[in-house]
Amino acid sequence: AWIALGLMAIGPQLMGHIGLNYSLKSIPAATVTMLLLFEPVGAGLISWIALSESPSKAEIFGALIILSGLALGLRRTKKTRKNDSMED
């Protein structure tokens, strides 16, 4: 049981780090960092669908704040990248 527990802890951790490092080859670091903020929202959606756990009003409000911030931040980085490419 301890080996299985260790593998469940190490496996996703390693895959997560490998995935992040791989994505940095083609996606700007600021975008990758902002997309990491989606993790709690995604986990809430998965628990809602897979486990039938209904989110509270506070959790929904928090998810909306996170999604709004991500939309603003990603839009801003897109404009910045466009302006940077025009200067080259």
Image: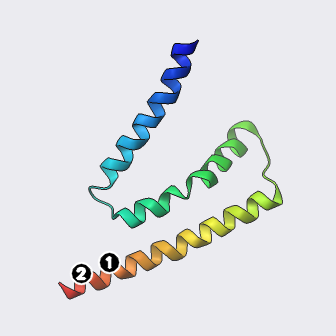
Query: Are the residues flagged by discs 1 and 2 in contact, CB closer than 8 Å?
Result: yes
| Residue at figure coordinates x 43%, y 41% from the top left | 16
| Residue at figure coordinates x 33%, y 48% from the top left | 21
Q: Residue furthest right?
A: 57
Which quarter of the figure has residue 48? top right
| Residue at figure coordinates x 58%, y 12% from the top left | 1
Which residue position holds label 1?
A: 81
Number of labels in the image equals 2
Q: Whole-Å distance between the Cαs marked 1 and 2? A: 6 Å
- What is the three-letter code of the residue carrying label 1? Arg
Which residue position holds label 2?
A: 85
| Residue at figure coordinates x 33%, y 61% from the top left | 27
Front residue of this view, candidates 3 and 61: 3
Disc ID at residue 5: none
Identify whether 83 is placed above or below 74.
below
**Secondary structure category for the residue under label 2:** helix
Crowding near the residue tagged with mark 2, few <14, some 14–19, many ≥20 C-alpha atoms within 10 Å:
few
Front residue of this view, candidates 75 and 3: 3
Q: Position of residue 14 (x, y in %)?
A: 40, 35
Q: Position of residue 37 (x, y in %)?
A: 55, 59
Look at the image and tell me in which quarter the C terminus lies. Answer: bottom left
Which quarter of the figure has residue 29? bottom left
Q: Position of residue 72 (x, y in %)?
A: 53, 76
Question: Position of 13 compared to 64: left or right?
Answer: left
Crowding near the residue tagged with mark 1, few <14, some 14–19, many ≥20 C-alpha atoms within 10 Å:
few
Question: Position of 22 compared to 48: left or right?
Answer: left
Identify whether 37 is placed above or below 79.
above
- What is the three-letter code of the residue carrying label 2? Ser
Q: Residue furthest top?
A: 1
